[in-house]
Amino acid sequence: MNLINIFKELTGGAPSFKEALREKRGIPRISCSINARARLNDRNRHFTITNLSLNGIRMESPIRLSTGLTFPLSVDAGAAALENSSFEYTTLRVKVVWCRKKRYSPLFIAGLSFTDREDILERSWVHYVFHRMGFDPESIFMPRGNLRIFSSFPVSCIGDNKVSDGIIINIGLGGLLMESTVDFSPQASVTLAIGPYKGFRKLTAGGKVIRSTPLEKKKEKLVAIEFETMPPREYKELGRLLLALLSEDVF
């Protein structure tokens, strides 16, 4: 049984799930650097938004943000990305979905979802950025071939006569992208130990390194790995894990 059929089995083929899945596949993500600010615990806090979608943002924070925290977040309307702006809302309400310590840095990385009504989002700085980048409504929701879900949990990778304990940045039906301090050779065969993540046990899989890309001004590499071998029991558990991640994915 392949992973697509497992998804159908786990969801019962419910139309609402298919529609939601199709929508999430079509939402693009933009890498950016936009200054933002909020008033938290009677103090002004400053953040940097590094990734943007129509559902939410990923940002760097000087403090750990509690999961579930909701607050108004404002952006600098004079920023280069927002110059000559023609939108009504520079402040949107956001909800913290996850937050983790940034490796080798005093900062934290957080994923937040937008909680405002759709009509407010359509007149906000978020839609302005997407329109400025050349996305119209048709192209914004055009389905992509592969679903990849942003995440943040551990993975161990053994192969190429090397061992690495890294962090999964995103994971999909056919593979994953991990942040690692070890540089693996392209086409190297590897063994993966994925997780554990919340209530899910650790998964094992065989894979092949597609590419390894150095991160600018950092020690880490981004390593893309394609799944090649995985027992049926592991496939089924991976399917459940992906569904759980999809329910909390905001990027």
Image: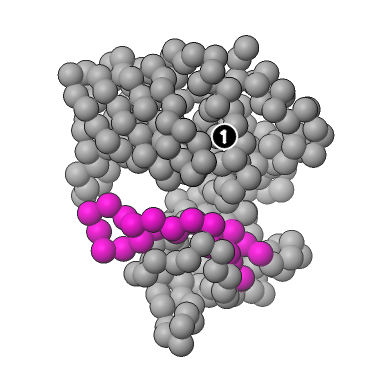
Residue 101 is covered by the magenta coloring = yes
Q: Magenta segment, principal secondary structure?
A: strand
- Name the residue: 60% across, 32% down: 240
Q: Name the quadrant containing residue 164.
A: top left
- Is residue 43 visible in the rendered image? The answer is yes
The amino acid pointed to by label 1 is: Leu
Mark 1 residue element: helix
Q: Name the quadrant containing residue 185.
A: top left
Near-viewer residue (37 or 142): 37
Left or right: residue 50 compared with residue 6: left
Instruction: Work out whether 99 lies above or below 206.
Output: below
Residue 111, x across and y down, in percent: 49, 56
Range drawn in magenta: 92-115
- Name the residue: 68% across, 48% down: 136
- Name the residue: 46% across, 71% down: 36
Residue 41, x across and y down, in percent: 46, 83
Residue 37, x across and y down, in percent: 46, 76
Q: Which residue is mark 1?
A: 242
Left or right: residue 231 compared with residue 113: left
Left or right: residue 52 compared with residue 216: right
Instruction: Work out whether 236 lies above or below 48.
Output: above
Q: Name the quadrant containing residue 26.
A: top right
Residue 233 is covered by the magenta coloring = no
Near-viewer residue (230 or 78): 230
Residue 57, x across and y down, in percent: 52, 57
